[in-house]
Each structure stands twice: as structure tokens, then as C-alpha cells.
Image (spheres, rainbow, N blue to C red):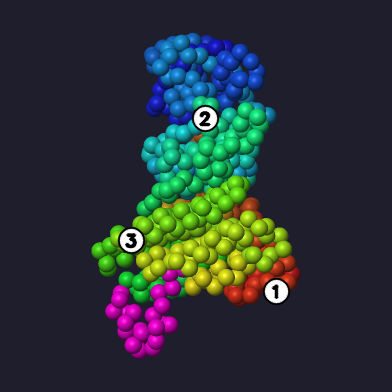
Amino acid sequence: MENANIVWRPQLPTSRVVAGTSLLHDSPPYLALSDTADTVERSRTAVFEAEVVENRKALLRDLPPDKIRVNPNVAELFGISTNDPNTSLSVSPINSLESTVPACRAATIVVEGVTPEALRRYLRREDGLLHPITETATIDGQEVRFRVTDSVPSMRDHATIRVTEQTDLEITQGSPEQRTESGRSRGDGSSGGSRSGGDGSETSDGDGDGDEEYPLDAKVPGHGFDAVAGFDDIKQRILSRIALAADEDLVDELTDKYNENFATRGNTMLLYGPPGCGKTFLAEAIAKEFKSRMEQATQKHVTYFDVKATRVLSKYKGESEERVERIFQQVREAASDGYSVIFFDEVETLVADRAADDVQSHQKSVTNQFLREMNEITDDVLLMGATNMPFSIDSAAARRFHSKIFVPHPGQEVMSEVWRKELEGVEGFDRIDFDELGRLSKNYTPAEISDRVVGSEIQSDVLQQYIRDDPVDLAADGYLQGKLQATSPRTVDEYVEKLKPHVLRNEMEGYDELESYIKEHLQDGE
């Protein structure tokens, strides 16, 4: 272990530290930085990728042999100043991550600069190291900032965790500076949410243990239906609804020809089906189409909000209900001079079935508040929710969702399109048999193809072979097919098995398409 002074370099990615061979003689792949606290309890150690340069080259790069080059965001991790030229950290070589850095089972990340999909691929491909700071990186030629807002294990207990193939990554776009991990250490000694008082009791300094910031940040939906493969019938249903909302003359014509029931706009929508099949992606596309078409037709602004329902919940009595009320109040205010679109992912957590035996009183209270807010929705608000478990939603809430849209895992034709989008621009694109890949992708979800097959298995192979100066030909006969057949679909099988008891207990009333879907897959498995 060596002590080294620091040269702060904002151009460096936060995951990397540069050192000379006088500090790290054996050129290890990783190194650990530790502060020089005078007690073990106060010390902190974090692990980074190592870039070791020869002493002569280090000097040419303005890096004295007794110093290390670090991104200044890392200062937050150790609570040190970037203005003190005498700041130092202890440096130790690390040869293996498995025995040093705990694997991350799940992480929620906010990213700015690239799409969530691009960051997900980058972290998996690079065996990404995560720290409780605003991270920086260059991805696809773009300068990117991102921050972990929640993780398992918690970054309160670990200064570094590592992404693996099994890590459940939930990534959204937003400002990393505004959405830090509530209740977790931020590295500078401050924290958000709840904390222990001097007597060991719990105190609160804001929104408790929830991650959502209030007021919500309005977002700009990034893609429309052109980016969504397949689901043509669903798209047409939604476009018809948007046309009804945008055209007062159409409303009048339908009312005159039929009656007002046929001209009801139906401004609440529930997307349900297996995980990983594009409900969230589809919801953003709906918001994009609604925004562009309504603004063109009415010349009024459309504001879009995206809420992860689980982050609204708080352990403090009455606070979850207050958050629900504040969210809808903001949505109504944004619609006062135009329109609002709000999407709740995992909406079942806010409208739990009050008749269920395992639902507690505070959950019933949140459901009651959400129902009251739904009653106040007007024609200038579009409310969307998504869930994997629609039968767990309170029946009164289910009735208030005027449109219920089943989003199954796609068939062969759509999966072929998923492969085309994933491999667009690669050498030999025209020689790839996408129809065959679509056929072989039966029971896979788009997320599995994107994240596990292309984003992990194939990318890992491509990178390793390229480093060995033996580039992979993705269009080679049987290559992609072999990689796909070397894996197996998991999401749909696990989902069907999980829902099987609910089908057997006849708990699918009102969701006939989902019930038929589960029964069909159970029969196929026999």
C-alpha cells in the first residue's frame, strides 16, 4: 500500500484511476483507493479500474510518479477537497473483483447524455463498477453522467459494487444531480430522507425513504411509434383515442350518429402483461404521439410526467397519500393551459386490492387516495399505468381505467424486427437471416434479446475476439443462431409459473386475454 497525492482530471471517467509504475509495479487491472482516516471506523475504500503507465510516459503526461490522476467527482466519495494540493489517498493493487467488490443484485440509476439502453449495455459490457457519486463516462462518443439512486446491496455499506449479468438494472433519464439515493450516504457525510438522531431514533429531513423528488420534473418523451416494433393493433387503438381527444368535430359527429357513450374520450389507460415486453417503452411512445399530435391539432402545450410508483411509497404514516395528492395536483396545474400526460410504472403498488387478505391498512389508505384523484381527472389529462399483475389492482381502480391493453411478448415477426434494431449498422447486416432469428426467439422477450443475448453474450464475445485481433463476423453462417440457442428464455416461463395459481383460483376476471395467454403457455409446456 502506497500513499499518493492526487492530480484531479475531469476528462477521466470516474471509474478509472491513472498511476505510474513506481506506485503499481505489476500493472494490476484494478486498484483500491482508501482515505487516510486515523481510525478504521472512519476509513473508506473504493475500487477502480487501473490504467498504469510507465514512469517516463507518466512524466510526459504531466503525471509525477508519486501521484495519481483521478476524476474530481471522486472527492465526494471520501469527503475531501479538490482545492487542497496536499490531498492524498492510499493506493493498493487489486487483481480480482470477485473477492473484493460485492456483486450488485439490483440498482436504480438516473442517466443524462444517452439512452437507458446504451448505459445498460455499457455497464454490462465493461463489468461496470458503481460508486455513490455522480459518475461520468464516454459512451458511443457521448459525454455521459449517471448516478445510482438505490441499490442492493446498499451503497450505505459499500463504496463500490459491481454489475454482473444477473444485475437487475432499472435506468431512467433525468438529472443525476437532482435525484440522489434517499437515505443513503452520498460520500460527503450528507444524506437525504431518514437518518438516525443522536438518541438512535428515526428523524426525517424531507421526503422520507422515497426516491421521487417533488415537484416532479417534466420529461420529453424520446421516441414515438416508429421506434416500437409490432403491436400494430395496439397502436391503432391508441391513435384512435388520440384522434378523439384532438378533434372536437369527431366527438360531435359520433355523438350525433350514435350517442355520447361512443364519443367518450377514455383518458385512463392500463397496460398489462409479462415483464420485459415493452410496456414502459410503449407508454413513452404513446406520450410522444399524444404530445406531437395534440400540440399540432390544438396549439396547446402537452406536459409529460413519468413516475415509478414504488418510489412514491414512504414508511412514514400518511406521507404516501400526501405524495399521491401532490403528484396529481401538479399534473392538473400543468394541464391548466394545455394538457398533461402522466405514466405510473408498477401502478399496482398504489392501488392495491383493498379486499385482499394480505393488504394492510396503510396500503388501503393509499388506494383510497389514488381513487379520489382518479375521480378528479378531466379531459385535459391522460393517465397511464403499467403492471405485470393486473389482478392485484383494486377492482374500483380497474373500473376507472377505461382502456385495458394487453401487451404480450411479441411473435416471430416482431422479434425479427427487434434483432434488426439491435444489429442495425453492423458489417454484414444484409447477410443476416433475421427471419430465422425471429423464429428461434420464440418465448424470448425483447428485453432478453437486447440485454442478455446481444448486450451481454454476443458483446462479450465480440470484445474478447477483437482484443485478440480475431474480429467476429456477426453475419457468419450460424454464429448468431448458435449464440441464441446457447441461452434459454426465462422471463415468460417464470411469469407463467408465477401466475399459474391465480389462473387455477379463477382470479383473472376482467383480464381474459392474460388468462388465455397463461393457459396457452401452460398447455405448451405439458
Q: Nearer the viewer, mark 2 or mark 1?
A: 2
How far apart in space, not on screen, are marks 3 and 1 (Cα)? 43 Å
Question: Which mark is in front, 2 or 3?
Answer: 3
Q: Nearer the viewer, mark 3 or mark 1?
A: 3
Q: Is residue 514 visible?
A: yes
Question: In this view of the protein, which residue sits in the foreground, 373 or 302?
Answer: 373
Which label's residue is closer to the chain start, 2 or 1?
2
**In terms of secondary structure, where does tag 2 sit?**
loop
Quarter residue 398 falls in: bottom right
Nearest to N terminus: mark 2 or mark 3:
2
At horizontal 28% and vertical 62% (from top left) the residue drawn is: 300
The magenta region covers 247-268
Q: Main secondary structure of the magenta part?
A: helix
**Are the residues tagged 3 and 1 within 8 Å (C-beta)?**
no
Q: Which residue matches tag 3?
A: 336
Name the image quarter holding the C terminus: bottom right
Expressed as whole percent of the image width and height from the top left, the position of residue 213 reads 46, 45
Label 1 is placed on what type of residue? Asn
- Out of 247 and 119, give the one closest to the viewer: 247
Q: Residue at x 57, y 70 (%)?
A: 396
Q: Amino acid at mark 2?
A: Ser
Residue denoted by label 1 = 506
Residue count near mark 2 (Cα–Cα under 10 Å), binned few <14, some 14–19, many ≥20: few
Q: Nearer the viewer, residue 478 or 392?
A: 392
Is 319 situated above or below 67? Answer: below
Image coordinates of residue 57 in percent, x first then y, are 43, 15
Q: Quadrant of the N terminus?
A: top right
The answer to which quarter of the image holds residue 501 is bottom right
Q: Nearer the viewer, residue 382 or 70?
A: 382
Q: CA distance from mark 2 to mark 1?
A: 50 Å
Disc 2 target residue: 190
Give the amino acid type for the residue marked by disc 3 in the picture. Answer: Ser
